[in-house]
Image (tube, grey):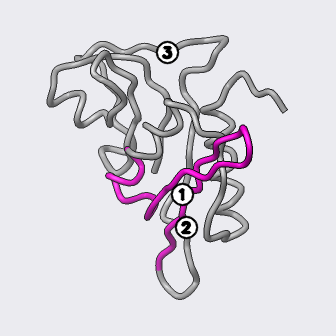
Amino acid sequence: MAANDTIADMLTRIRNANLARHQTTQVPATKMTRSIAKVLREEGFISEFEEAEEGVKRNLVISLKYKGKNRQPLITALKRVSKPGLRVYSNRKELPRVLGGIGIAIISTSSGIMTDREARRQNLGGEVLCYVW
């Protein structure tokens, strides 16, 4: 399956794994998915990710986090914002706040991929990749 939108693909795989209460999920490893996984880990939405090679293909194995004895997923929702058909950019003054700061927006800036909070701190705008809460 050749998905042109690796980010949407990644978010969907995490969403599905969360619904099925899986411990881990695999997404194709690209620079972009690696950076997003790093942000999710830093923000505490996932516990860990590592790279696994299957022949030519490289995958990221993402370990999901759940809370409580009902194993509620920590990630309530993942929403793709900027799509290949419609890019969404935001300057530093207009960076979105997700659920009043409860969630994060993942922004692709000239200094790499970071959260909206970090981008604000560094006074950067960029492409709004997705929201996570």
Q: Residue furthest bottom?
A: 69
Q: Of helix, strand and loop, which one carries label 2?
A: strand
Q: CA distance from mark 1 to mark 3?
A: 22 Å
Q: Is residue 54 magenta?
A: yes
Estimate the x, y position of residue 7 in percent, counting from the top left: 60, 32
Vertical arrangement, residue 64 with respect to residue 4, above or below: below
Vertical arrangement, residue 63 with respect to residue 6, above or below: below
Residue 73's disc number: 2
Q: Residue at x 66, y 40 (%)?
A: 28
> Which amino acid does the dot numbered 3 rest on?
Val
Q: CA distance from mark 2 to mark 3?
A: 28 Å
Q: Left or right? Give the position of 102 relative to 46.
A: left
Estimate the x, y position of residue 74 in percent, counting from the top left: 48, 64
Q: Are marks 1 and 3 in contact (CB under 8 Å)?
A: no
Q: CA distance from mark 2 to mark 1?
A: 7 Å
Q: Left or right? Give the position of 87 relative to 120.
A: right
Q: Left or right? Give the position of 3 relative to 81.
A: right
Q: Residue at x 16, y 20 (%)?
A: 123
Estimate the x, y position of residue 125 in percent, counting from the top left: 29, 17
Q: Residue furthest right?
A: 1
Crowding at dot 3, Cα within 10 Å, few <14 / some 14-19 / many 20+, comes out as: some
Q: Residue at x 47, y 76 (%)?
A: 67
Residue 88's disc number: 3
Mark 1 highlights which residue? Answer: 76
Q: Left or right? Give the position of 128 relative to 52.
A: left
- The region drawn magenta spans 39-67
Q: Main secondary structure of the magenta part?
A: strand
Q: Are marks 2 and 1 in contact (CB under 8 Å)?
A: yes
